[in-house]
Image (tube, grey):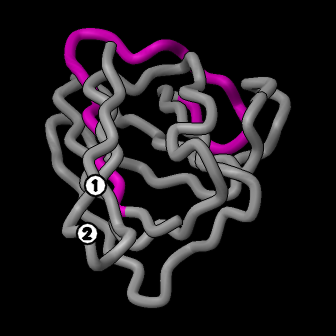
């Protein structure tokens, strides 16, 4: 599991944040600061629907804290989301994924990977 943040061109502050294996262990504060999310590219190679969850808090109590955003990604599918005006996360961006929708922690995703790439501006 590896998270990388790559700056875009120097004249703008956007960057991509990529996680190669998103699962039901939250990746806390993937942006390192507050940020506005403008795009998500979610690729689900699992054999079941994955629910990608975004939180505006750093230390998520998974299964208890309600996510700010939940995006279902069907088994074996790719979901690309573009948000023209952006979704502002005032604290930070934390994410996780599982077989359970909403606040439910859900079972761990198995038999594949959910890869997430977010385009953000701090």
Q: Is mark 1 on a helix, strand or loop?
A: strand
Horizontal side of residue 14 vs 67, given as left or right: left
Rendering quarter of residue 27: top right
Q: Residue at 66% across / 24% down in the picture?
A: 105
Q: Residue furthest bottom?
A: 85
Q: Main secondary structure of the magenta part?
A: loop
Which image quarter: residue 102?
top right
Residue at (20% x, 68% y) in the render: 9
Which SS class for mark 2?
Answer: loop
The 10 Å Cα crowd at callout 2, few under 14, some 14 to 19, many 20 or more, is few
26 lies above or below 15: above
The residues bearing labels 2 and 1 have C-alpha atoms spaced at a distance of: 8 Å
Tag 2 residue: 10
**Quarter in which the N terminus is drawn:** top left
Residue 21's place in the image compared with 84, above or below, is above
Q: Which residue is drawn at 56% across and 53% down?
A: 70
Q: From the viewer's perspective, is the residue at label 2 or at label 1 nearer?
A: 2
Magenta residue check for 101: yes
Relative to 11, 97 lies left or right:
right
Q: Is residue 114 magenta?
A: yes
Q: Mark 1 points at which residue?
A: 7
Region rendered in magenta: 100-119
Taking depth in this image into account, of 30 and 64 the one nearest to the observer is 30
- Does residue 40 appear to the left or right of 61 in the view shown? left
Q: Where is residue 79 in the image (x, y as percent from the top left)?
A: 24, 56
Q: Residue at x 53, y 32 (%)?
A: 96
Position of 16 compared to 64: left or right? left
């Amino acid at each position: 599991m590896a998270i990388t943040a790559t700056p875009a061109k120097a004249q703008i502050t956007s960057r991509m944040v990529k996680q190669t294996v998103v699962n039901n262990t939250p990746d806390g504060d993937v942006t390192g600061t507050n940020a506005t999310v403008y795009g998500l590219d979610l690729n689900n190679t699992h054999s079941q629907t994955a629910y990608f969850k975004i939180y505006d808090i750093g230390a998520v109590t998974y299964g208890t804290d309600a996510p700010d955003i939940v995006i279902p990604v069907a088994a074996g599918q790719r979901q690309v989301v573009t948000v023209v005006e952006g979704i502002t996360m005032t604290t930070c961006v934390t994410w996780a994924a599982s077989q359970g929708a909403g606040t439910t922690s859900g079972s761990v995703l198995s038999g594949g990977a959910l890869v997430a790439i977010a385009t953000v501006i701090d």
